[in-house]
């Protein structure tokens, strides 16, 4: 079969465009997989209650003496509602949401982040002064928003 020079050129351009297009789609999918925004962990928001460590939210003491606290923020409560730690403790907070976007702000500290369905956000703080630190939701999340709070007791 004889293919005219121009036709051949157009076929080549067509194949190149198709390859580029597929390449971009693959790159986008791959890049999204290996490099989520801000390096955050992902969690299926419909399976938070059965996904470790969020199936048992709460405080864990690490071997180096610091703490990790895993929180589930949902309408209209934080779990755990209260944690108690000794003064001088460093705590890394991890939070996710199974429903809507919530805020996670601890008064008198620089901990201020969002609890976003599908993602695990984290922040670390050292609690020097004893007292009760209020954890509040600072994103409007519905009718019970103003009742959504928790406490960090530093003894
Ligand atoms: Cu949760 Cu506002």
Image (tube, rainbow, N blue to C red):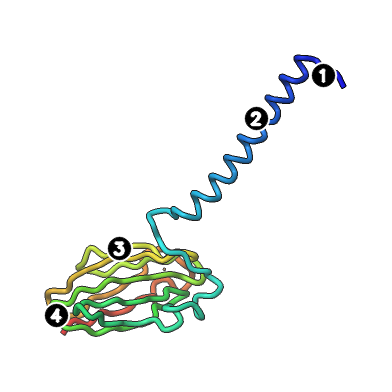
Tag 2 or tag 1, which sits nearer the N-term? 1
Crowding near the residue tagged with mark 3, few <14, some 14–19, many ≥20 C-alpha atoms within 10 Å = some
Q: Residue furthest top?
A: 5
Q: CA distance from mark 1 to mark 2?
A: 18 Å
* Of 150 and 83, the residue lying toward us: 83
Report if the CB atoms under discs 2 and 3 are less than 8 Å apart. no
- Numbered badge on residue 3: 1
Quarter of image, res 21: top right
At x 31%, y 82%, the residue is 59
Q: Secondary structure at mark 4?
A: loop
Q: Which residue is mark 4?
A: 87
First along the sequence among labels 1 and 3: 1
Q: Nearer the viewer, mark 3 or mark 4?
A: 4
Q: Position of residue 4 (x, y in %)?
A: 80, 15
Is residue 148 or residue 7 the one in the foreground?
Answer: 7
Q: Residue furthest front?
A: 1
């Amino acid at each position: 079969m004889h293919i005219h020079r121009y036709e051949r050129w157009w076929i080549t351009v067509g194949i190149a465009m198709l390859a580029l297009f597929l390449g971009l789609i693959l790159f986008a999918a791959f890049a999204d997989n290996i490099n989520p925004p801000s390096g955050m962990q992902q969690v299926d928001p419909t399976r938070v209650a059965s996904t470790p460590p969020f199936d048992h939210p709460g405080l864990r003491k690490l071997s180096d003496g610091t703490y990790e606290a895993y929180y589930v923020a949902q309408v209209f409560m934080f779990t755990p509602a209260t944690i108690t730690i000794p003064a001088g403790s460093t705590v890394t907070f991890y939070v996710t949401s199974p429903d809507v976007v919530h805020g996670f702000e601890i008064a008198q500290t620089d901990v201020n982040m969002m609890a976003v369905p599908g993602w695990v956000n984290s922040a670390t703080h050292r609690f020097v002064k004893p007292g009760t630190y209020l954890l509040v939701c600072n994103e409007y999340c519905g009718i019970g928003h103003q009742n959504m709070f928790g406490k960090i007791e530093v003894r």
